[in-house]
Amino acid sequence: MESKKLLLVIILSMLLVFEKGASTTVTYDHKALVIDGKRRILQSGSIHYPRTTPEIWPEIIRKAKEGGLDVIESYVFWNYHEPVKGEYYFEGRFDLVRFVKTVQEAGLYVHLRIGPYACAEWNYGGFPMWLHFIPGIQFRTTNELFKNEMKLFLAKIVNLMKDENLFATQGGPIILAQVENEYGNVEWAYGVSGELYVKWAAETAVSLNTTVPWVMCAQEDAPDSVINTCNGFYCDRFTPNSLSKPKMWTENYVGWFLAFGYPVPYRPVEDLAFAVARFFETGGTFQNYYMYFGGTNFGRTAGGPLVATSYDYDAPIDEYGFISQPKWGHLRDLHKAIKHCEEYLVNADPIHLSLGLKLEAHVYYKSSNDCAAFLANYGNSSDANVTFNGKSYFLPAWSVSILPDCKNVIFNTAKVVSQKTTGSTAFTHNAVTIENSLESDPWGWYQEKVGIANNHSFASPRLLEQINTTKDTSDFLWYTTSINVEENTKKRKAKELQLMVGSLGHAALVFVNKKPVGFGYGNHDDASFVLSKKIHLKQGNNTVDILSMMVGLQNYGPWFDISGAGVFSVIFSDLKNSKNFSSTEWIYQVGLEGEYLGLDKVSLANSSLWIQGSSVPIHQSLIWYKTSFSPPEGRGPVSLNLSSMGKGQAWVNGQHIGRYWSSYRSPSTGCSDNCDYRGAYDSWKCLKKCGQPAQVLYHVPRSWLKPGKNLLVLHEELGGDPSKISFSTRSGQTICAHVAEIDPPPVDTWKTDKDQTSQVPSLRLNCEQGWTITAVNFASFGIPTGDCGAFIEGSCHLDVLSIVHQGCVGKSGCSIPITMAKLGDPCPGVQKSLAVEAFCSV
C-alpha cells in the first residue's frame, strides 16, 4: 500500500513538472545566450498582447512559430496595468500572465521588456498619467520619487511572473528581461544624472533576482551586469561594450509606424533579409523583428502626436492576423538557412575574407574541412561574380548568400522564391471580401453642443495647458471666452477682425458665436500650429469657443513627459491694433457633453437622447451617430471602412475601435510602389498611398461581434457621411509564386549528408489555415514575365495548367517540382521558370 502511495506521489510530481515545464538555466558568454549549457542562435519577434485580443493570441503565435521564430518579445504597459496608483489591472487584452502562458503552450520562449518605459508609439510611452502629477517628480533620472515608483512596478511584474512560475528556472518560458528602453538615445539631455540613473536601473533590475539575463537596448554605457543590445535597421556593425557579452539585436524594424497625414511606409523583404543575414554573418546570435505582428492601437492607446490606430508596421503578420507574403515566407526560409548553420555560428568567431570591392565572405569553421560561409555583396548597384573555395558564385547587389557546407548556396536574400499575394492590405479589391453596407440601416444622431454644456466647467484668468488640465481623461478641452464690440448706432455692420490662435497641438476647432470659423492642426513631427482666420463680430457681446483636441500623448524624446498641448495664444487684430486674450478670463470644460452622457455605451443605444429620422445630418461637425448592423458572415476579422468620414472616434458594442482621421491626406508626391531594395533603408525611403488618408480601414475583432444586430457609435468631429460606411471580411485571396530551374531547392530539404545535385527547386503554394486552393488561374513553364496578378506568357511557353490544377486544387498547400520530367521542355537549352497564380478560399 505504501509503495502504491509513493508511486502515486511520484506520478503526480512528474505531471506537475510536465505541466509547468522543465527548469531551464539561461546564461550567456561572448558568443550567445546559453540555454541549459548550449549556445543558441535565436530568432525573435515582437507581438504586443494589448494590440490584439486574447482569442487571437494562439493563432498569431502559431504563425510566428511556423515562420521560424524561437522567441516572442513584448513590452509591459504600465499605464494600463496600474491606471490608478496602487490599483492593478491584468484582464482581457491586458492579461499578461495568460499571454506568457499562451506563448509557452506554443513551445516558444519569451523576452519580457518590463521597462517600465516602453515608447512603442504607445500613449505617454506607457507611463501612467498619475505619475506625472506626483509633486516634485522627474521621469527617467535620479529623482527619488520616480525611482521609488519605477522600482515598485518592476518588482510587481517580476513577482507576478515568479508567482506564476514563468521564469525559465521555474519551468517557464521567460529567458530574458529588459529594464529601461533606448535611454542611450536621450541620455545626453539628463547629464550626469542620466549616467547615474542607468547604473541604478541596472542594479535595481538585477537585484530582483529573476535568474535570467537582463538587457538594456541602445545603451552603450550599460553596466557589466546587463547586456547592451542594438536597435536599428541594420546592426551588423554593432559590438557589445564588453568582450563577455553576446551580439544581440532587440529591434530590427520590419517597416515603420503609421501617422495621420503621412504616406504609408514599407520595407522590401529583400533588404530586411539582407540586414538579418549580415547580422548573423558578422557574429550576431539573437535578433528580434520589431514588429513580427503589429496589431491595432485600440481606443486611445496610440501614442503621439498623431500616431494612427493601425500599427500594422508592414509586419510578416498583418494587422488582422493574416500572413503577409512574401515577407513571412522569405524570412521563414532565411531562418531555416541560418538554422542549418547554427552549430558553426556558435562554435567560433568568423574568418573574414575579402572577395573584391564591397564583396566579402565570413567563414565559420568547426574543423579545417568543415565550415559554413556567408558571401556578401554590400554594394548597392552592381551584381558580381565572386570566387570562393575555387568555385564561382553569382551575388546580386545588396545581397547575402548562405552556404551551410561552404559549397552549396541554399539561400540568397535578394532572390524571393516564396509565394506572394496580390494587393497591399488584407481587404484589398484583389481579395474576395464579403461587404455589408450601412446605407439602408436607420441612423440615430445627437448634436454635440458648442462650448460649455454642463456644470463641469471652471474658470481661469489665463489660458491653461491642456494635458495638465484634462489629465488625459479625454481628448477634448473647451476654451470659452467673450469679446465685446462697442455698439455704434451709425455703423450697424459687423466688425472684421483677424483671429490668430496659437496651439501646442494637436488640433482645434474654432467657433465664433457658435458658428465654425476654422480648423487647425499639426502633424507627427511638429504638432504645434497657428490658425489665422478673418472673422466678423457683431456689435455687443460675442462668444469665442475653441475645442482643442489631442491625438495621442507624446511617447518619445528627452523630457517628453513634460511636453505640452493645447491653446497658448489667442490674438484679435485689425488694421490699427491687436489685443492678446491669453490673460483674459477663460471658462473651461474637460471633455464633451456626449462623453459625460456616455453615448458610446450599449446601455444608451435606445435612449431618447438619440434623434431618429429618415433625414440624417451629414457633413456636420461635432455630431454623434449610432446604428445597428449585422456583421459579415464568416469567422475571420472584420474591417470597418470609414473613408466617407472626417475625423473622430468609433465604438462597436461599446468596444473602442480607436481614432480615425480620413480627411487628413498625405502629400501627393514621394511614393513608389516599386521601391529599390538596394541601398540603406530608412523610414522615408519606401512610401505608398501618397495623396490619400493614412488609414480608412479599421480592425474590428470578430470576438467583439455577436450574431444578429450589433451597435456602431461614431463621434464625428469635422463632418462626414455615415451612410457610406461599410463592414467587410475577407473570404479569399490570390496567391502566386515564380520559381526558376536554377533556383536552390527548398531550404528545408537541404541535408548535409545528401548529394545536392539530386535536389531540385520546387514551387510551393499555401493557403491560410482552414482555406483551400479552389482554382488555378495561370500556370506557365518557360520564360513568363510580370508579377503576381499580372503574369504574362513568354515567347517560350508550355501550358501546365492541368498539371498544377491536379497537384493543387482542393488542397491547403501544394509543391510542384521544377523538372523537365514533371513539366516537359518547351525550349531546350533555355533557362526556364514556372509561374503560377492560384486562388484560396474558405
Image (cartoon, helix red, strand yellow):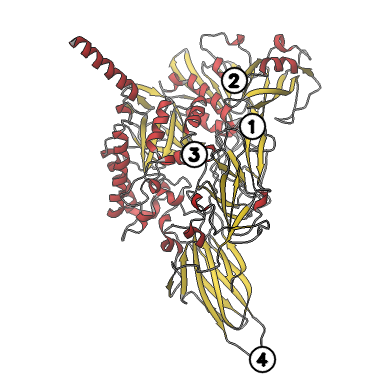
* Residue highlighted by disc 1: 731
The label nearer to you, 1 versus 3, is 1
Dot label at residue 490? 4
Labelled pair 1, 2 in contact (Cβ < 8 Å) = no
Q: Secondary structure at mark 1?
A: strand
Mark 4 nearby-residue class (10 Å; few <14, some 14–19, many ≥20): few
Q: Position of residue 664 (x, y in %)?
A: 62, 54
Q: Position of residue 439 (x, y in %)?
A: 68, 48
Q: Amino acid at mark 2?
A: Thr
Q: Image quadrant of residue 392?
A: top right
Above or below for 438 versus 40: below
Q: Amino acid at mark 4?
A: Lys
The label nearer to you, 1 versus 2, is 1
* Residue highlighted by disc 2: 387
Q: Residue at x 43, y 49 (%)?
A: 125
Mark 3 / mark 2, whichever is N-terminal: 3
Q: CA distance from mark 3 to mark 4?
A: 66 Å
Image quarter where the C terminus lies is: top right
Q: CA distance from mark 3 to mark 2?
A: 49 Å
Of residues 840 and 562, which is closer to you in this image?
840
Q: CA distance from mark 4 to mark 1?
A: 71 Å
Mark 1 nearby-residue class (10 Å; few <14, some 14–19, many ≥20): some
Q: CA distance from mark 1 to mark 3?
A: 20 Å
Labelled pair 3, 4 in contact (Cβ < 8 Å) = no
Q: Amino acid at mark 3?
A: Thr
Q: Residue at x 48, y 56 (%)?
A: 598
Q: Secondary structure at mark 3?
A: loop
Mark 3 nearby-residue class (10 Å; few <14, some 14–19, many ≥20): many
Q: CA distance from mark 1 to mark 2?
A: 49 Å
Q: CA distance from mark 2 to mark 4?
A: 95 Å
Dot label at residue 52? 3
Of residues 554 and 339, which is closer to you in this image?
554
